[in-house]
Image: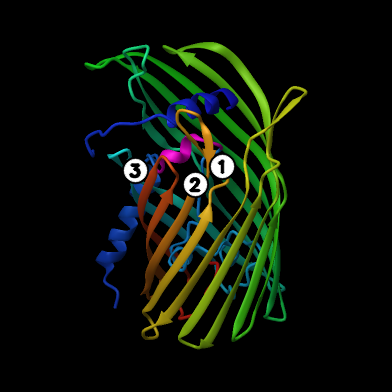
């Protein structure tokens, strides 16, 4: 991980060049199923040119309903204590399609992907409790970078990264007086990445390929709570520090030349808060704030600990939802954040912030006897002094319950 990041800082801070760009009808339900199954069966592809640094991009809630109002994390199933009026088994599965256009010094490239976003399931238990479980991505590590020809060689480097870090979670929540809820969950964090470093001569053909493979594993807990009344709601959760055990080794032409290295990455705690206000039964406003005080994140190898050079950052969102009628809501949102790691500006490799602003829209289509299909669209503008990205995302969330019913304000499952 340490060696891989050092090498990527050199490459990602260089220039990459332009390459070829590459009533509800049952038919709609079948179409949604096909998209979700295709996403679940296909490995993820490139998402961001910035993903070569740190642990990669912090991913969203994986819920189209929440993504459409700016993705307030504390109002989603990321919060184990979110208040849910659950009287039957329910699940939702999400898929996302994305395209990212990066521009640098007049050159541009387009990256595209379709991938699973999240899967969550919950079932009610006696005494107003519920058992829930699921899997979601925490960090995305897919990227595809080209460097300029080096001044002292005839080679260019093409680095392709594939992978991510995921949380497999299970927990228990308890509702109190139909207005409060508290919950806790256990997270097994796991994942891996594979970086292929290809060295290309100017007139075609790869002369060599180096491969760096990294595996991650860790465990953590999360606790959350929420309050909901007819007019307003409040929610929040706390995630303790996360310690990841990392195994890394390197191959050159398929031969392991670097013995497996084991080290630890420590990420400080995270906090998330959200609130919503419903002045009328058809209109609601939502605010979200997530804090990542990660300036003290570090990496330990043996008896030596070094800083990961992360930052204390926050993510804020504001959104609104309006019901045109009892079955067709319209959602809009705005989000802003600074990424927890910096970009490095060539040739001095000066750390520079990566800022992101997002515009979000969406709606839901009810499926009687099944649940609903939530749809969201997002446009994200990412900016650093040497590289800019514009990312577009379309997310589908298929929510199933044993008996469908209209809920004016539905969070979680």
- Residue 39 locus on image (x, y percent): 36, 48
* Upstream in sequence: badge 3 or badge 2: 3
Screen quadrant of the N terminus: top right
Can you tell which quarter of the image residue 398 is in? bottom left
* Upstream in sequence: badge 1 or badge 3: 3
Labels 1 & 3 near each other (Cβ < 8 A): no
Secondary structure beneath label 2: loop
Residue that badge 1 annotates: 341
Residue 50 part of the magenta-drawn span: yes
**Mark carried by residue 27:** none
Q: Can residue 408 be seen here? A: no
**Mark carried by residue 354:** 2
- Which class describes the residues within 10 Å of circle 3: few (<14), some (14-19), or many (20+)? many
Labels 1 & 2 near each other (Cβ < 8 A): yes
Label 1 and label 3: CA atoms lie apart by 18 Å
Q: Nearer the viewer, residue 158 or 34?
A: 158
- Residue 196 locus on image (x, y percent): 42, 24
Is residue 394 shown left or right of residue 301?
left
- Which class describes the residues within 10 Å of circle 2: few (<14), some (14-19), or many (20+)? some
As displayed, is residue 282 above or below residue 52?
Answer: below
Label 1 and label 2: CA atoms lie apart by 8 Å
Q: Which residue is drawn at the image coordinates 61% and 59% (left, top)?
A: 290
As displayed, is residue 99 above or below residue 407?
Answer: above
Q: Which residue is drawn at the image coordinates 63% and 83% (left, top)?
A: 229
Is residue 336 shown left or right of residue 226?
left
**Mark carried by residue 102:** 3
Q: Nearer the viewer, residue 112 or 372?
A: 112
Report the span colored magenta. 47-54
- Residue 147 locus on image (x, y percent): 36, 26
- Which class describes the residues within 10 Å of circle 1: few (<14), some (14-19), or many (20+)? many
Can you tell which quarter of the image residue 104 is in? top left
* Upstream in sequence: badge 1 or badge 2: 1
């Amino acid at each position: 991980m340490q060696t891989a990041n050092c090498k990527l800082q050199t490459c990602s801070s260089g220039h990459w060049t332009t390459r070829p760009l590459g009533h509800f009808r049952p038919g709609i339900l079948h179409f949604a199923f096909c998209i979700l199954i295709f996403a679940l069966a296909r490995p993820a592809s490139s998402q961001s040119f910035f993903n070569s640094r740190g642990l990669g991009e912090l991913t969203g809630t994986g819920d189209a309903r929440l993504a459409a109002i700016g993705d307030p994390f504390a109002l989603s199933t990321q919060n184990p204590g979110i208040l849910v009026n659950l009287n039957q088994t329910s699940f939702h599965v999400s898929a996302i399609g994305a395209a990212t256009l990066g521009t640098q010094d007049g050159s541009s490239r387009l990256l595209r992907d379709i991938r699973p976003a999240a899967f969550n399931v919950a079932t009610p238990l006696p005494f107003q409790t519920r058992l829930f479980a699921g899997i979601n991505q925490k960090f995305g590590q897919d990227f595809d970078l080209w460097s300029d020809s080096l001044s002292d060689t005839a080679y260019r480097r093409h680095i392709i990264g594939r992978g991510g870090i995921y949380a497999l979670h299970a927990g228990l929540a308890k509702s109190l007086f139909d207005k409060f809820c508290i919950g806790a969950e256990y997270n097994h964090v796991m994942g891996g990445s594979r970086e292929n470093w290809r060295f290309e001569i100017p007139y075609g053909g790869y002369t060599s390929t180096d491969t760096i493979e990294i595996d991650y594993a860790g465990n953590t807990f999360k606790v959350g709570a929420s309050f909901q009344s007819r007019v307003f709601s409040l929610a929040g959760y706390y995630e303790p520090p996360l310690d990841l055990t990392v195994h890394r080794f390197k191959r050159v032409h398929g031969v392991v030349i670097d013995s497996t290295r084991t080290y630890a990455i420590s990420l400080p705690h995270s906090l998330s808060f959200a609130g919503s206000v419903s002045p009328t039964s058809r209109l609601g406003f939502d605010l979200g704030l997530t804090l990542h005080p990660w300036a003290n994140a570090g990496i330990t190898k043996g008896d030596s600990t070094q800083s990961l050079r992360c930052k204390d950052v926050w993510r804020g969102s504001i959104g609104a939802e309006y019901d045109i009628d009892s079955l067709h809501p319209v959602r809009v949102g705005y989000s802003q954040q600074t990424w927890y790691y910096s970009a490095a500006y060539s040739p001095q490799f000066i750390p520079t912030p990566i800022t992101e602003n997002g515009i979000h829209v969406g709606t839901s289509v009810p499926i009687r006897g099944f649940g609903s299909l939530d749809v969201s669209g997002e446009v994200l503008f990412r900016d650093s002094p040497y590289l800019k990205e514009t990312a577009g995302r379309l997310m589908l969330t298929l929510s199933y319950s044993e008996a469908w019913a209209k809920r004016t304000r539905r969070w979680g499952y």
